Amino acid sequence: MSGAREKAILKQAVSHLLPQEIIDRPKSGMMVPVHFWFRKFWTRKAKSLLLDKKAAIAPYIERNTIKDWLNYRENLWGKYGIKLWLLVSLEIWLRTYE
């Protein structure tokens, strides 16, 4: 880092390979396909992690709320998806570092 400029060293190292507009463009973030992952791979795993009677998040989040979110039949991602993804991440983290 160079002050608030992230990846300053990397940009310097490749500045001769990339157009200046790429080097100078503002940060744009990176979209991760969490929505796809959750729908395709994580729904069942999320249920087993978050609704487990021994879930590490159990003291912090009501099971019925999680059940409602997981059983939501419309656009799950638009309504509760990011919350569920964060809870799954927290649950895995808590189990790892308890």
Image (cartoon, helix red, strand yellow):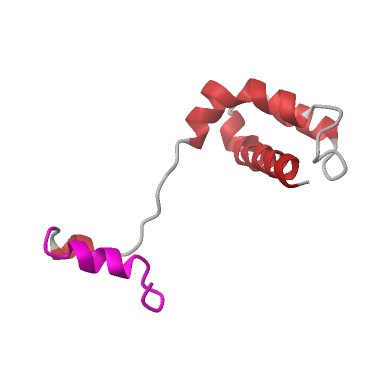
Does the stretch in magenta take in 7? Answer: yes
Q: 8 above or below 94?
A: below
Residue 8 occupies which quadrant of the picture?
bottom left
- Viewer-nearest residue: 26 or 59: 59
Report whether residue 47 is seen: yes
The location of residue 47, given as percent across then percent down, is 71, 24
Does the stretch in magenta take in 3? Answer: yes
Relative to 35, is 82 on the left or the right? right
The quadrant of the rendering that contains the N terminus is: bottom left
The residue at 52%/22% (across/down) is: 40
Residue 33 occupies which quadrant of the picture?
top left
Report whether residue 25 is seen: no
The residue at 55%/23% (across/down) is: 41
The location of residue 29, given as percent across then percent down, is 40, 54
The location of residue 90, given as percent across then percent down, is 69, 44
Residue 3 occupies which quadrant of the picture?
bottom left
The residue at 73%/23% (across/down) is: 48
Find the magenta span and give its range.
1-17
The residue at 73%/47% (across/down) is: 97
The location of residue 17, given as percent across then percent down, is 12, 58
Residue at the far bottom: name it: 3
Q: How many marks?
A: 0
- Viewer-nearest residue: 22 or 13: 13
- Viewer-nearest residue: 64 or 46: 46
Residue at the far front: name it: 97
Relative to 25, is 42 on the left or the right? right
Relative to 63, is 39 on the left or the right? left
